[in-house]
Image (spheres, helix red, strand yellow):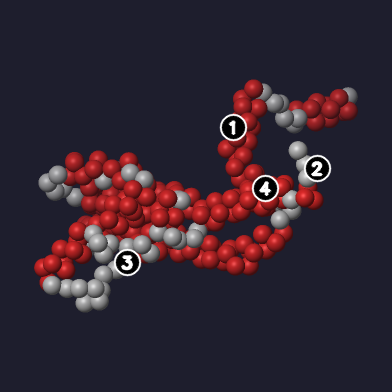
């Protein structure tokens, strides 16, 4: 009698595979296929190539990626949080327009912003040309920040990705009760103190979620960092993949592997 109960208990814990389970597993496999392909390539018989990447390039990729993520994280948090607070808690002319206009950067890829700002701010662009004409300057007479740099990439990515923090922060601010802020003001807290001690802690999960989304977009961005000649994980994986393709073709065409199909 006890053995039957034990068998029933054991069989009840056996997972049952249904159509939806198989479908989710298939979708997960398709989504992870690029990562699995890169991992399989890393185990290919190209030890010299992997040694070169790990010794000379991997550290640079890690450093540049961390600098971009740190700068973009601060930039999107500053832009998204401040704009969300202003359009939600303040009343000013055009507020309803700005509520939706602040989402427009999501319609433009970061590399489009990089192209546009580079054309505007480079040496041959209209802004520097106007300054040289007005003040009669020539090359070397003034200092202008270089847009095609890591700081320029941070600015472009921050301008393109801050809507993630703006949307999540604004949704959190809209859910907060105004009576809490009124109670804080009645207890002697000012506007800034109420923001930092009441609104900001309540919106912390939403802010973290928005910053995390922006950082993942930063880590996967290729167009901006490639245009600015910044070596990150995205450009490194691309170059690493092409190098494996080239080494594989060279190995395939070598006389030692002439028997390969």
Between label 1 and label 3, give the one nearer the viewer.
3
Q: Is residue 122 left or right of residue 7?
A: left
Q: Nearer the viewer, residue 237 or 2?
A: 237
Q: Position of residue 13 (x, y in %)?
A: 75, 31
- Find the distance from the CA under tag 4 to the CA under tag 1: 32 Å
State the CA–CA distance, disc 1 to disc 3: 44 Å
The mark found on residue 27 in the picture is 1
Q: Nearer the viewer, mark 1 or mark 2?
A: 2
For residue 259, which numbered disc appears in the image? 2
Snapshot quadrant of residue 193: bottom left
Q: Nearer the viewer, residue 5 or 194?
A: 194
49 shown above or below 36: below
For image coordinates 30% across by 57% down, the residue present is 118
Task: Please indicate, yes or no, whether residue 237 appears anywhere in the rendered image.
Answer: no
Seen from the viewer's position, the closer of residues 154 and 92 is 154
Q: Tell me the mark number nearer the camera, choosing from 3 and 2.
A: 2
**On the picture, is 62 further left or further right than 99?**
right
Labels 1 and 3: the sequence-earlier one: 1
């Amino acid at each position: 009698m006890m053995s039957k109960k034990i068998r029933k208990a054991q069989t009840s814990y056996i997972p049952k595979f249904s159509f939806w389970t198989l479908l989710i597993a298939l979708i997960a496999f398709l989504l992870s296929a690029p990562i699995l392909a890169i991992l399989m390539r890393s185990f290919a018989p190209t030890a010299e190539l992997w040694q070169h990447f790990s010794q000379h390039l991997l550290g640079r990729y890690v450093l540049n990626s961390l600098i971009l993520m740190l700068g973009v994280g601060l930039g999107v948090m500053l832009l998204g949080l401040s704009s969300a607070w202003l359009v939600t808690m303040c009343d000013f002319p055009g507020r309803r327009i700005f509520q939706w206009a602040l989402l427009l950067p999501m319609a433009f890829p970061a590399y489009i912003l990089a192209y546009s700002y580079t054309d505007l701010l480079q040496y041959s662009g209209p802004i520097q040309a106007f300054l040289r004409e007005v003040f009669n300057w020539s090359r070397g007479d003034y200092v202008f920040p270089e847009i095609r740099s890591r700081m320029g990439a941070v600015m472009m990515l921050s301008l393109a990705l801050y809507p993630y923090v703006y949307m999540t922060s604004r949704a959190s601010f809209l859910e907060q009760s105004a009576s809490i802020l009124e109670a804080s003001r009645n207890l002697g807290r000012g506007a800034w103190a109420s923001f930092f001690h009441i609104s900001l802690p309540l919106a912390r999960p939403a802010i973290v979620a928005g910053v995390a989304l922006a950082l993942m977009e930063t880590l996967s961005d290729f167009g901006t960092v490639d245009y600015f000649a910044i070596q990150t994980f995205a450009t490194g994986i691309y170059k690493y993949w092409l190098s494996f393709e080239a080494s594989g073709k060279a190995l395939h065409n070598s006389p030692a592997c002439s028997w390969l199909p």
